[in-house]
Image (cartoon, rainbow, N blue to C red):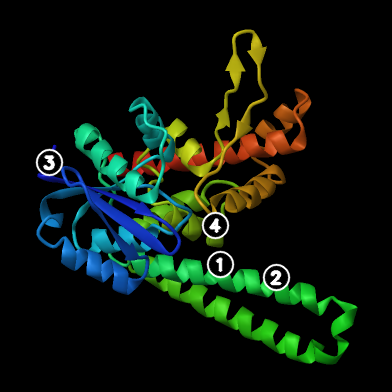
Amino acid sequence: MKSYRNFIGIDIGKFNFFVAMYGRKSAREYENTPCGIDQFLKDFSKELPEALCVLEPTGGYELKLLMTLCDHNYIVHRAHTRHVKNFVRSLGNGAKTDNLDAHYLSLYGFERSETLSKFSLQSASASKMYELVQRRRDLKQMLVAEKNRFQSPRVESIKERILAHIHFLEEEMTDITNKIEELISQDELLKKKRKILKSIKGIGDIISFELLISLPELGQLSRREIASLVGVAPISRDSGKWKGYRRTGYGREGIKPLLFLAAMAARNSKSHLKDYYENLIGRGKSKMVALTALMRKIIVIANARLRDLAMT
């Protein structure tokens, strides 16, 4: 286990992020932009080579900084939000600000450094592929909106323009998809991982590369950890004799919709996953509960198979 001289906590928001180092009282604020990230790297150029950086997933806002740190070979731990919250509660302090959160993350890194895993990119082009995937998602949202507008009777006079924009968006999505496919084809490990994912019923071309790029932890966590990270793990709400209804929590942005599509496809396939779904329905579970359980089973299987690949 590597020993660290510095422990840096980074609390990231949509527009800015706060950086605090264990042992220092003040925290610095930077814009969550390429310029702001570059300034952070310059200001902490002496500390970062011997530091453990700790940050939390914040709906994707952390990924640009996370991947930039990895590109510079700095050590980063992507902390589980629930673990950090429980750690902060154990300190007995209920106050919360972005400045304080950064300090808590640096303290969390200092006290837990021997057990915290290092985040690593799957490929040298991981950051580029991530940007392409994000752009493809944006285009998909715009395409859905334009197709909905095209169906509206209020826009008869501009339907031709909307149709032209739809064709443009479709061409852009195809171009980006081809670029992602090209980058994956140049990486032997990603090619193997993708082949394994596609062997699971319900996971096709698009879902396989989105999972690989948006969920790099796949294959590195336990079955419970990956289900919790994705947001498909049932959360108990029991107290004494009272048994609360178990619900899933929030997960990594963009992953649940992918797993929902995979579960819908697997439900209609001729496989053990369809049998698993129908067995739940036969036991009286609602369709939505059964689909959520199927989503969890798919991601757990994917995680196990990629973990087995890493061990070979």
Q: Earlier in the sequence, mark 3 or mark 2?
A: 3
Q: Earlier in the sequence, mark 2 or mark 1?
A: 1
Q: Position of residue 107 (x, y in %)?
A: 24, 38
| Mark 1 and mark 3: Cα distance apart in space | 38 Å
The foreground one among 124 and 84 is 84
The foreground one among 241 and 310 is 241
Q: Is residue 169 above or below residue 293?
A: below
Q: Earlier in the sequence, mark 4 or mark 3?
A: 3
Secondary structure category for the residue under label 1: helix
In the picture, measured across the screen, residue 256 lies left or right of residue 130, that is: right
In the picture, measured across the screen, residue 291 lies left or right of residue 220, that is: right
Can you tell which of label 1 and label 4 is closer to the viewer?
A: 1
Q: Position of residue 257 (x, y in %)?
A: 61, 52
Residue depicted at x 14% and y 37%: 1
Can you tell which of label 4 and label 2 is closer to the viewer?
A: 2
Callout 3: 10 Å neighbours few (<14), some, many (20+)? few
Identify the mark at residue 214; answer none if there is no mark: none
Amino acid type, callout 1: Arg
Amino acid type, callout 3: Lys
Identify the mark at residue 144; answer none if there is no mark: 2
Q: Which residue is mark 4?
A: 207
Residue depicted at x 64% and y 74%: 142
Secondary structure category for the residue under label 2: helix
| Mark 2 and mark 1: Cα distance apart in space | 11 Å
Secondary structure category for the residue under label 4: helix
Q: Position of residue 65 (x, y in %)?
A: 32, 61
Q: Which residue is mark 3?
A: 2
Secondary structure category for the residue under label 3: loop
The foreground one among 44 and 187 is 44
Q: Which residue is mark 1?
A: 137
